[in-house]
Amino acid sequence: MAARPPSGASVARTSRHPPRRDRVADALAEHLKAAALDVADDGIVISDATRPDAPIVYVSPSFERLVGYSAEEILGTNCRMVQGPGTDLDTVRQIAIALGAGHVFQGEILNYRKDGTPFWNFLRIAPIRDGAGRVTHYVGTQTDVTELHQARERQQELTSAVAHASRVRTVAALGASLAHEVNQPLAAVLANAEAALRLLESGKTGEVREALESIVADARRAGEIILRARRLVRNQPAQAEIVSPAEVAGEVLAFIRARLRHAGVEAVLEGARSKARVRIDPVQLYQALLNLVLNAVEAMEAEPAEHARKLVLRVEAAGDRVRIRVADTGPGAGDEALARMFQTFHTTKTRGTGLGLLVTRSLVEAHGGRLEVTRNAGRGLTFTIHLPGESR
């Protein structure tokens, strides 16, 4: 048997003359890599981080197709070439800050193709470092997510439309109570106006002022009732602002005061002076609480008269969160009913649509919160809205 050559000689000969199968494998790997880059949907861009303005040094064919520019037009420029009038400058600043700190950036931005067509671009830009840890290049993957973005917008529009329809239906259902609530201050206005006229005729002008002040107060009360109803039926985009949940809860109870009296429900607001604040659209928070309160009232109303009917709204801060609880003394719910409570079109009411709780949960979740339901130790259920707190 021939002696095997020394391992060193073998390695040296291999390094000078690699086997043909290795060269074939390397060529195949390069071919497959080029083919993968050519058919990939995600565009790939590499920029030189060592040079001013980080010029682009490589683009994949898919990026050329994405933006409509050729590689010759792109190389040596930077990604500002795909920015346009609708590009969010704050996002551009966030990208610069992340890359300047050597961090990865990931997010969506509105970009423009060569022909001016806008598209939503999902970016992920990561730094490449050398052996010494210095950033030498940035590699970015870019994906056209326009259809996904538009789908989210359509979903938001649908949620808003359903919420608006729910508000209109709620106001319609409260029509008799609203009419009664408005009629009371209007009747008082009329009585005080007639009294003021009589006082003027009798020469008792000193007492006219008191009658006029009562007229102003009652007119304001009627106006507030009408204003609350108008807020609910108006279809306008959500506008988040810092609001007091306790104040909104108080307005809800004032709005349905006649409904509570008619149902024989004692309503209590705990934490009325709470300093808790949340960032949310006030009309949507109002609607969410109104839905929960009316559900509680209807649940208790269906119970025999001998059962106590008590509704408790409680607002409390819990660390960096705010909790708003709506507790009732109604019949409660079994395990199956609790499991299905937030399902679309599920309802236990004869005339229910099954959308009230679903809309309420959607409104809460749209503002970074969540809605949960639990059984009370005694009778009834407690619905709790959890929202991120907002410092004043």
Image: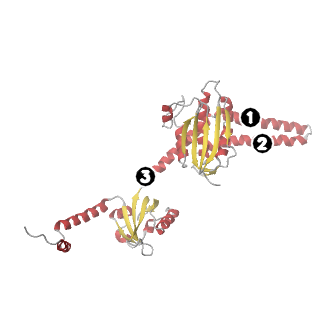
Residue hosting label 2: 217
Residue hosting label 1: 184
Label disc, if present, on residue 148 of the rendered structure: 3
Residue 58 coordinates in the image, percent (x, y): 35, 69
- Disc 1 and disc 2 in contact, CB within 8 angstroms: no
How are the colours assigned in the image?
secondary structure
Residue 289 coordinates in the image, percent (x, y): 61, 41
Residue 117 vertical placement versus 293 (above, below): below
At x 40%, y 57%, the residue is 144
How far apart, in angstroms, are the residues tagged by discs 1 and 3? 52 Å
> Mark 2: which secondary structure?
helix
Residue 104 vertical placement versus 208 (above, below): below
> Mark 1: which secondary structure?
helix
Q: Amino acid at mark 1?
A: Gln
Q: Amino acid at mark 2?
A: Ala
How far apart, in angstroms, are the residues tagged by discs 1 and 2? 12 Å
Relative to the observer, which residue lies in front, 379 or 301?
Answer: 379
Q: Is residue 160 visible?
A: no
- Horizontal placement of 141 versus 359: left or right? left
